Amino acid sequence: MLGKIEHLGIAVKNLEEAEKRYTQLLGVPPYKRETVESEHVITSFFMAGPNKIELLQATAPESAIAKFIEKRGEGIHHVAYEVEDIVAEMERLRQQGFTLLNEAPKHGADDKLICFVHPRDAHGALVELCQSI
Ligand SMILES: CC[C@@H](C(=O)O)C(=O)SCCNC(=O)CCNC(=O)[C@H](O)C(C)(C)COP(=O)(O)OP(=O)(O)OC[C@H]1O[C@@H](n2cnc3c(N)ncnc32)[C@H](O)[C@@H]1OP(=O)(O)O
Ligand SMILES: [Co+2]
């Protein structure tokens, strides 16, 4: 079973500008910046009450974020759900015919193990599973 929404991922062109705007919007500064080399992204995290927002800027043209912005422009890129046992959830989803975008859990930002589910299997929304390390 998937748990609560762990974060919303928002694709941005310029992280510095987006951080300034989201600081104005949310009324709090980001609590963390983190580069994830394997995903070719730099991220910035905010808390909006109990909810987490992840801004993502591409660091290379092959990044999923760069491709997304090229095709669709800036905006909500993925919905991440908390899971207690990512391997068990991956197996459960695989058995139900979902296409997992990584074979095994990988290291994400903010001390998480992550796995992505193809957006075509969730009515157009890219899904990220997140287990705290
Ligand atoms: C920082 C680490 C981590 C965390 O800890 O939180 C992250 O959040 S990393 C976030 C970035 N990483 C990823 O997104 C990895 C998973 N994504 C992928 O593997 C790919 O992006 C994809 C979803 C498989 C799409 O790749 P690809 O097929 O190569 O791209 P296309 O541009 O050809 O798109 C095909 C099709 O899918 C639509 N699409 C693409 N991205 C999304 C999206 N985020 N949400 C909804 N739909 C998406 C795209 O528009 C194409 O549709 P059509 O044009 O209708 O064919
Ligand atoms: Co994410």
Image (spheres, rainbow, N blue to C red):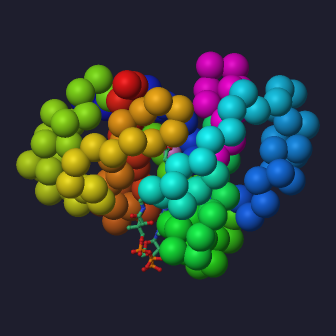
39, above or below 54, in the image: below
Q: What span is in magenta?
A: 43-52
As drawn, is 78 to the left or to the right of 73?
Answer: left
Q: Tell which of 131 and 89 is nearer to you.
A: 131
Q: Please report the residue visible at 22 percent of the width from the left and 48 percent of the height from the top.
A: 104
Quarter where residue 113 is shown? top left
Quarter where residue 59 is shown? bottom right
Residue furthest top as drawn: 50
Q: Please report the residue visible at 28 percent of the width from the left and 43 percent of the height from the top.
A: 105
What percent of the width, then of the height, locates residue 13? 74, 64
- Ligand 1 shown in quarter: bottom left
Quarter where residue 70 is shown? bottom right
Can see residue 10?
no
Q: Tell which of 69 and 14 is nearer to you.
A: 14
Q: Does the magenta stretch mainly form a helix, a strand or a loop?
A: strand
Can see residue 35?
yes
Q: Let me know if residue 99 is in the magenta part.
A: no
100, above or below 55, in the image: below
Residue furthest left as drawn: 95
As drawn, is 9 to the left or to the right of 25?
Answer: left
As drawn, is 89 to the left or to the right of 7?
Answer: left
Q: Let me know if residue 44 is in the magenta part.
A: yes
Q: Tell which of 96 and 55 is nearer to you.
A: 55
* Quadrant into which the N terminus falls: top left
* Quadrant into which the C terminus falls: top left
What percent of the width, then of the height, locates residue 26? 81, 32
Q: Please report the residue visible at 78 percent of the width from the left and 60 percent of the height from the top.
A: 14
83, above or below 21, in the image: above
